[in-house]
Structures are given as structure tokens and as C-alpha cells.
Image: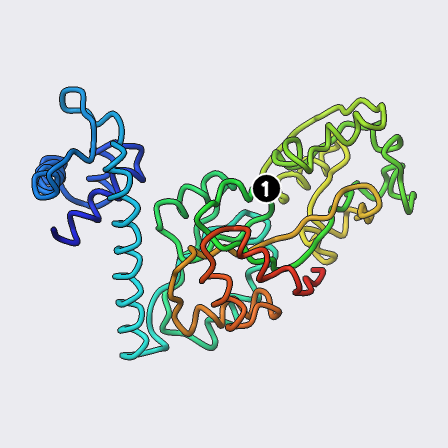
Amino acid sequence: MKLHQLRYLVTIVQNGLNITAAARALHTSQPGISKQIRLLEEELGFQIFEREGRNVTRVTAAGQAVVEHAARMLEEAENIRRLSADFQDENRGSMSIATTHTQARYVLPPVIKQFRARYPKVDLHLHQGTSEQIADLAAADRVDFSIATGSHELFPTLALMPCFRWHRDIVVPRDHPLAFVTKPTLKQISEYPIVSYVFSFTGRSSLSELFERHGLKLEVALTARDADVIKTYVRLGLGVGIIASMAYEENEDRDLVAIDGSHLFPESVTWIGVRRGRLLRGYMYEFIRLVAPQLTRKLVNRALAEKDAAGVGAVLESIKVPSY
């Protein structure tokens, strides 16, 4: 049994049992992967996968147990490499972050600036996408950190640690009727088309459900995942914008008025996620501290040592999460 065979095995599962996709991810050949999996099955004495012709169709019960053990072994091998790298040079390495547009555009720039000043030899890789895209990167273990809001169910293998709370603002042009209303009601907002995030219309933070509960009809003019796009279309007069409070910049958005929407919309919490059981390098703890000072190294280690989300939650329930 060889480590690369276990890596092939786990990568096949991560790629939906698609050996071609696994070969592409591993930069190797499909026949080479298939041969190594066959050799591993011969050594183990049972099938890991069920097949129809050349296609893998499902993981056997025994194979599932092997996959779980293999994933833990690969994680520990990676931890050993991280430990070795820290002893050789604690200030050199790389770090990958997957996050949303709002975090990448408005929250992380000052954090990354400080981090780069402290660790100029650490290569940073920033992946921007939707919660679903971030979850795919995390599931494939292609990033060190995931930073997002909500969608906890998409990240079952990560320890999700709260960074800060934030609320939504209503943005309108300066000559808009709502620009002169300090605390607009949902009824007043419902009189205009809405321009907001795609994710705001699903799940617990659903705007449509919020308006329906108050017997109001919500007219959606446009949805987007980018706050800058939302503000652009608000400027064009398509409707009233609803964005994250940190996405309004006084200097850049002087032609718009931001109205505090905390009395209307539920509060949100941005979290940083790390795979449970992961050994972090020294500069990674510093990155977490810059994003969320309340997440001390001791607290992070306790959270990462937990086996499930409930355990992580119990570790973190007593911390005070600041507002952005």
C-alpha cells in the first residue's frame, strides 16, 4: 500500500467517481490511476469500487471505510509536511483562501496588506466565488481557508469559526424619495423594485419570505453576486439596492445614500473555515488573528481538534463576536 494510491483513491471520490477528472486534478493519466487502484484492491483483497464496464459507479461499504481512513492518513501526511516546513523556515510558504466577492473586495484588503508586510515570503492565492464554489474547493482540499457567510450545511468537514457580525444597508441615489427617510419600513421599500444579492432570496435570509410574512409583494429588478454590480444598477435607476453594510464606501459612493437596514433584515455572521484536524503553520494563525482577533491560537486549536460541528460550536459558543 502506497501513499500515492490512497491519494488517487480519495481524489476519485472527491471528483464524483470520475477518474478522468481525478487524473486531471492530479496531473497524471487515467490508465495510471486505474492500474494503481486495481493493485490496491488486489492487496486489500476486496473491491473498493463497483464498476459497469470501465466506469466506476459507486463505493462499496468496505471501500467507504478505506476512503475515510485514507483521507485521515493523507491529512496527517500533510500535517507532517507543514510541521517540517515550519521548522525549516516559519516565514516562508503559501496560503490559499476561498471567499466571496464582498469579503475579497471590502474586508480582506487591509488584512492582506498587514499580512504581506509581516510575511513577504508567503505566496497568497485568493479564489473568489459563490458559497457553492467555495464549498467545492474546500471539499477537494484545495484551499487552506474558506471565508463566507451562512451556508453551513455546505461545509461538513470544516471547523467554522465566527469572525464578525454585519447587517444590510439600503442604497439609493441621492435624489430618491427613500434618501430622505431615516428608518424606512418594508412597506415603503416594497413600493420600488429591488436590486440585491442572489443569495438573499434563498434560505434563512430570504428577502422574499420576509416580505411575504408582512403581506407585501416583492418585485425583483435584478440579482447579482457582486455588490459593485448592484450599486451600478441602482445608479441606473433600476431599483432600490440591498447590500452588505461594508460594501458601501463613502468616498467611492458619494452619489448614493446608504440607509441602515438593521431594523429590517436579520443579522449575518461571517465565518472562517478550516478543515478539522488540520495542523496550521505559524503564519496561518496570524492570518486568522488579523481577520478575527477573538480567535486565539489556543481557541483555534481546540476547535480544530473537535470531531464534528457540534463540538466546534460548543468550543466557540462563549466567545464574543464583534460587529464589523
Give the image location of residue 235, x and y in percent.
72, 38
Residue at the image position 17 percent from the left and 54 percent from the top: 3
Quadrant housing the C terminus? bottom right
In which image quadrant can residue 281 be found?
A: bottom left
In the image: residue 113, left or right of residue 83: right
Q: Amino acid at mark 1?
A: Asp
Q: Is residue 239 left or right of residue 319?
A: right
Does 168 appear above or below 82? Answer: above
Q: Secondary structure at mark 1?
A: loop
In the foreground, 257 or 79:
79
- Asked if residue 177 is positioned above or below residue 97 in the image, the reply reads above
- Residue 74: image location, x then y, percent: 26, 55
What is the total number of numbered labels drawn onto the structure image? Answer: 1
Question: What's the residue at 89%, 40% (across, down)?
Answer: 184
The residue located at (47%, 68%) in the rendering is 301
Q: Quadrant of residue 61?
A: top left
Which residue is denoted by mark 1 in the rendering?
226
Residue 238 or 283: which is nearer the viewer? 283
Residue 278, percent from left and from top: 38, 61
Badge 1 crowding class, 10 Å Cα cut-off, few under 14, some 14 to 19, many 20 or more, is some
Vertical relation: 2 (above or below) 43: below
Picture coordinates of residue 106, whole percent (x, y): 61, 56
Colour setting: rainbow
